[in-house]
Image (cartoon, rainbow, N blue to C red):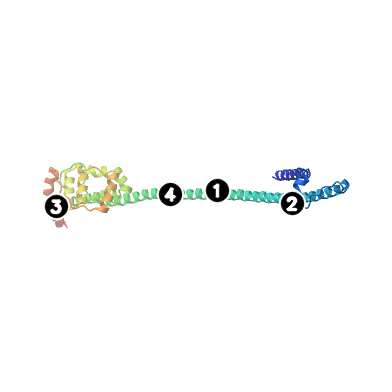
Amino acid sequence: MSVAISSFRLLAILATLLAGPLPCLALDAKLPANLVPPKASASQPLDKAAPLAEAVTEAKMAELSKALEAVSDRADKLESAMRATDKKSNELADEDRALRRRSAEVQLWQLAIQACTALVIAATVWQAARAAFLNRFNVQATAFLQLRDAFARLRPQLPLGFGSGFEEFPDTYDELYAMERYWHQSFDEWFLTQRVHPFTLGRLWKVYYRDAILKSRESPLMVAALSRAKHGSSSPVDQEFVDVVLGKVPDRTFWEHAASWVRDIFDSRGPSAAPANEARASELQSEWAAKAEALRRARDKRI
């Protein structure tokens, strides 16, 4: 840009110099009236007119010099302004680069913070999932041990071979009553694993309790005990348990458990009608009350 200004100054000076002598060729036409030398008359000698023309030429040259100085000063000022503009432009460019560099650093810090946040969230989720996974097994183990302990206290009171298809009534009232209590215990195992906590304890039912409980329905006397244990209950849950034991309804799937959970929140079910028992179980149930009363009296006599 400095080279352009110098070139401009040089061209201005050359144009001014070239324009200077040209008017001198026709002084009579270009010079002001007060500067036009008088024409030499025939009586006036030529040597007196020459100094006057030289004076006019010197005055014109002085004016041209002043004009050149003014143009030079203007060119210097313009060059200074252009240099200041260049300097300001360079400063602005430096500031822009600094701002961009700072913006890039801020973006890098933001990305680093976001990455750290994502890692913290992932670690928190993993820790929570691990704790929930371990807690699920702990709950399963605790529930299994508690239910197993309750059955262990009941098992010595049951008659031998109670789940092997026998049809003979036991000899003692305690054994007969223990058969009813067995189904109460089985109901607790089914209800806890299939209704209260199906998503946490449902595996216990599928792995252990289902096969053990359904094995007992091979005995008609145990089926009669089941009907006796349900006798007088109008709860739909009790009826559902009986239907599950008798094989009338299949186990619920995951989605059926979820739908039941939602339905239990927003709806309520009324009591259902009593089911029809199997033929042999009905016959044994009709004898149940009399047998229980006789065994109870025999026990009281022994006491």
Q: Position of residue 182 (x, y in %)?
A: 22, 49
Whichever of callouts 1 and 4 sits on the residue coming sooner in the sequence is: 1
Q: Which mark is residue 283?
A: none
Whichever of callouts 4 and 2 sits on the residue coming sooner in the sequence is: 2
Q: Position of residue 239 (x, y in %)?
A: 19, 49
Mark 2 lies on residue: 70
Q: Are marks 1 and 4 in contact (CB under 8 Å)?
A: no
Task: Please state the total of marks drawn on the protein image.
Answer: 4
Residue 57 falls left or right of residue 286: right
Gap in angstroms between the C-alphas marked 1 and 2: 56 Å
Gap in angstroms between the C-alphas marked 3 and 2: 137 Å
| Identity, as a three-letter code, of the amino acid under mark 4 | Val
Q: Are marks 3 and 1 in contact (CB under 8 Å)?
A: no
Whichever of callouts 4 and 3 sits on the residue coming sooner in the sequence is: 4
Mark 4 lies on residue: 125
| Identity, as a three-letter code, of the amino acid under mark 1 | Leu
Mark 3 lies on residue: 292
Q: Which mark is residue 108?
A: 1
| Label 3: element kind | helix
Q: Mark 3 or mark 2, which is nearer to you? A: 2
